[in-house]
Image: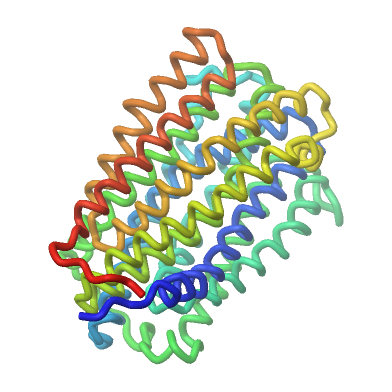
Amino acid sequence: MEPMPFKRHITQTIKLSLPLIISQITVVAMTFVDTVMAGRLGSVTLAAVAVGSSLWATAILFVFGILMAIPSVISAMDGADEHDQIAPFFRQTLWLALILGLLFTAVIRMMDPLFALFNTQAEVIPEATAYLHALSWGALPLSFFVAFRYLADGLSVTKTTMYVSFLGLLLNIPLNYILMFGKLGFPQLGAQGCGYATATVLFIQMVSYTVITHKHKIIGRYRVFAQLDRPHWGEIWGFFKLGFPIGMSMFAEVGFFSIITLLASSLATEVVAAHQIALNFASLLFMVPLGLSMGITIRVGNAVGRKNPYDIKNAGFFGISLVLLTQVFAATVTVLFAPQIVALYTRDVAVATIAINLLFYAAVFQLSDGIQVASAGALRGIKDMNFIMLSNIFSFWFLGFVVSWYLCFERGMGAPGLWIGIIVGLTAAAVLNTVRFRFKTALKNPQPVT
């Protein structure tokens, strides 16, 4: 079987991933807007949004992870021309999205005790709690939005998510302004207003994607709303088992970053704010490799459906190489423009000084962060979900967390110690995931790629 030429691999990956990258950047741009606007209300509000959003991300990205199995399944069905199976399969995933959305609405509203557990500064807790409770109303809409988005991604229709994400960003700015700062007759709600604004945006995005799924010329032909299927618990359970390792792997990774933020919250308020600035900007840059990773998953999954072992391997490794190039650029930008970047977030000199220092650590982990997410995307394409889960648990919790705790508290390094632990965890995950994909796609008689 003839392998696809190198040039086509690269162009196809870029073409497929570019809307996903823009979509992810837009999503994180909402967090960027939240952070910048919270910073205008003071370091306490900024710290509250930082801590609250970390807990939100930990919980809700478990939902993202479970539903992230949708693109690999649908892209494989598409590659194998099993189009009649797509709509029935997706209707069952909607039942799972409903269950997960309701469950995590409750979970997010019960997270308050974690603030005391991690010795969060007392002045930060009331605003962080109000922010989380307001934001919890967005859990169910987000769950459905993610399901619709992954259906489109699995069918290689990636521009729709970009448009809906842009809509969310455009709405988020005025809603934040009105609710956080108390405009147009509304009270000044601060961090709580930020939570309500995000929840409102998520609801509007869910409704928008519902209409797109029905009307789109490609997605609409599958007629996923043509009937309301009863839940088939065996199928739902089977899909849950497929997605659960991805959910756990994302929970392990994002939970690790959230715990690091909670550990930082026991330090000075200025340190918490600086940590949030550095982490928020690093997250913005991370959207490029994350979008490429999603594209890699779709392309590898499609090659699996076509039963082409050469394209499976090449789609993965050429994609990883492309991500590496983007991360070298990202690290360079972070180092060269650190003071200018921090100036976008805060005018507080103490916060800015700490944040500039932390951005240099963020620049270092760009390389390993990109490789680990790209190789994880390739592994999702071949449905090697369990390994990603085990790799993340080991890398982030048995290595990264231990190093962060030891350097920050036992060695007295503070926030820099936490960030060195992040670098260790990401590097371990990058090595393990890449070696695993190489092992799983090794060919006895490889053909040259032109």
Counting every numbered tag in the picture gives 0
Vertical relation: 438 (above or below) 209: above
The answer to which quarter of the image holds residue 281 is: top right
Q: Which residue is rendered at x = 30% and y = 75% of the image? A: 302
Q: Which residue is rendered at x = 37% and y = 69% of the image? A: 298
Residue 138 in view: no
Residue 161 in view: yes
Pick the front one: 419 or 165: 419
* Figure colour scheme: rainbow
**Residue 44, horizontal then vertical, whole percent:** 72, 28
Pick the front one: 31 or 185: 31
**Residue 158, horizontal then vertical, whole percent:** 50, 74
Pick the front one: 135 or 146: 146
**Residue 4, horizontal then vertical, whole percent:** 33, 77
Vertical relation: 93 (above or below) 242: below
Which quarter of the image is occupied by the C terminus?
Answer: bottom left
In the image, 7: left or right of 332? left
Vertical relation: 392 (above or below) 446: above
**Residue 368, horizontal then vertical, whole percent:** 46, 41
Q: Which residue is rendered at x = 22% and y = 75% of the image? A: 308
In the image, 171: left or right of 101? right
In the image, 177: left or right of 259? right
Which quarter of the image is occupied by the N terminus?
Answer: bottom left
